[in-house]
Image: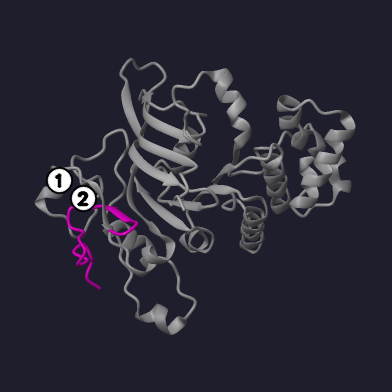
Amino acid sequence: MTEASPLVRVVNLKKYFSASPGLFSRRRYVVKAVDDITFDIMPGETLGLVGESGCGKSTTGRTILQLHRATSGKVYFKDRELTSMPNEELRQLRTGMQMIFQDPYASLNPRHPISKIIAEPLVIHRALSKHELRDRVAELLLLVGLDPAYMRRFPHEFSGGQRQRIMIARALSLHPEFIVCDEPISALDVSIQAQVVNLLQNLQEQLGLTYLFIAHDLSMVKHISHRIAVMYLGRIVELSASKALFEDPLHPYTQSLISAVPIPNPRLEEKRVKIILKGEPPSPANPPTGCSFHPRCPLAAEICSRAVPEFRQIFTGHYVACHLADSRGGSKIPS
């Protein structure tokens, strides 16, 4: 039996933006939003991508889908390389790759009924009759738990959770295999977040979907993800199976993130030591030399300020970019 090939492969991906300090300034500088990241996503898997705001998570998702063209590196979808693919060929391949955006309020056209919103990808990519379009929209609404009778309503007539379900229905309209979920629950009430996550999990089992799930909430990412990648200042600093990451985090940044996740047991929560990082994240326009985390790292050594750590495998399937991490847990922050 041969091992399955990755559905998505990202190899040394970089995305840099050119910017200026002011409207009339001639001076330019480079923002390293995504800086040399590599990972795979297997068919039917959910890879969680977490990190602080501004670390490059959303840019990673958009660059994988070629909404941003990569500065360098490669992205493969079903062994087809996307970064150098002509626009027309890429357009045909987009039916297999879709995105659920963060803000359901800003992502739906307020002038259109939801039937037109959901049907738009079908009108562009499929030659269907009006009757077939209406049937497909009704089918998609049922799939995400909405009444097909709502299809003539407008976005302002729905709650936030319902709007996000409409976004999911639109993403599913072309039978995609891979979906980038760009913080799909961050704009929703806590009570609604679990419903949307459960819906995504059910759809994954039912339709065989593969997700890149971008989020801030580590506890929710732990719930939905098979593996988790931790990102800091444009780089992936740790990648592991979800359970292993929470039980044995190797990178000091990951340890600090996990220490901030509340435990639903007051006695354990009282005894736990929280790791408070000093300072603020550096600017991606002027990143520090060596390890990008070393100015805030409580374990930083001399080598951390001058050499970029290799992203290497410590345990089977557990990768980390830290000079001090080893199989003996050498990068543990003392509690």
In percent of width and height, residue 124 lies at 72, 25
Q: Quadrant of residue 308?
A: top left
Question: Can residue 153 be seen by looking at this rendering?
Answer: no
Colour style of the rendered protein structure? one colour
Magenta highlight range: 315-335
Question: Can residue 257 be seen by looking at this rendering?
Answer: yes
What kind of element bears circle 1?
helix
Q: Quadrant of residue 99?
A: top right
Considering depth in this image, is 169 or 109 the residue closer to the camera?
169
- Farthest residue to the front: give it: 1
Q: Residues within 10 Å of mark 1 (few under 14, many from 20)?
A: some
Q: Residues within 10 Å of mark 2 (few under 14, many from 20)?
A: many
Q: Amino acid at mark 1?
A: Ser
Tell me the quarter of the image containing the C terminus: bottom left
3D distance between C-alphas at marks 1 and 2 = 6 Å
Considering depth in this image, is 141 or 289 the residue closer to the camera?
141
Q: Is residue 158 magenta?
A: no
Q: How many marks?
A: 2
Say the numbered circle drawn on residue 294.
2
Q: Is residue 320 magenta?
A: yes
In percent of width and height, residue 315 lies at 28, 60
Considering depth in this image, is 9 or 301 the residue closer to the camera?
9
User: Do the residues under discs 1 and 2 have CB atoms within 8 angstroms?
Assistant: yes
Residue at 31% from the left image edge and 33% from the top image edge: 285
Q: Is residue 197 above or below residue 29?
A: below
Residue at 47% from the left image edge and 81% from the top image edge: 265
Q: Amino acid at mark 2?
A: His
Residue located beneath label 1 in the image? 305
What kind of element bears circle 2?
loop
User: Image check: 149 left or right of 277?
Assistant: right
Residue at 26% from the left image edge and 35% from the top image edge: 286
In percent of width and height, residue 213 lies at 52, 50
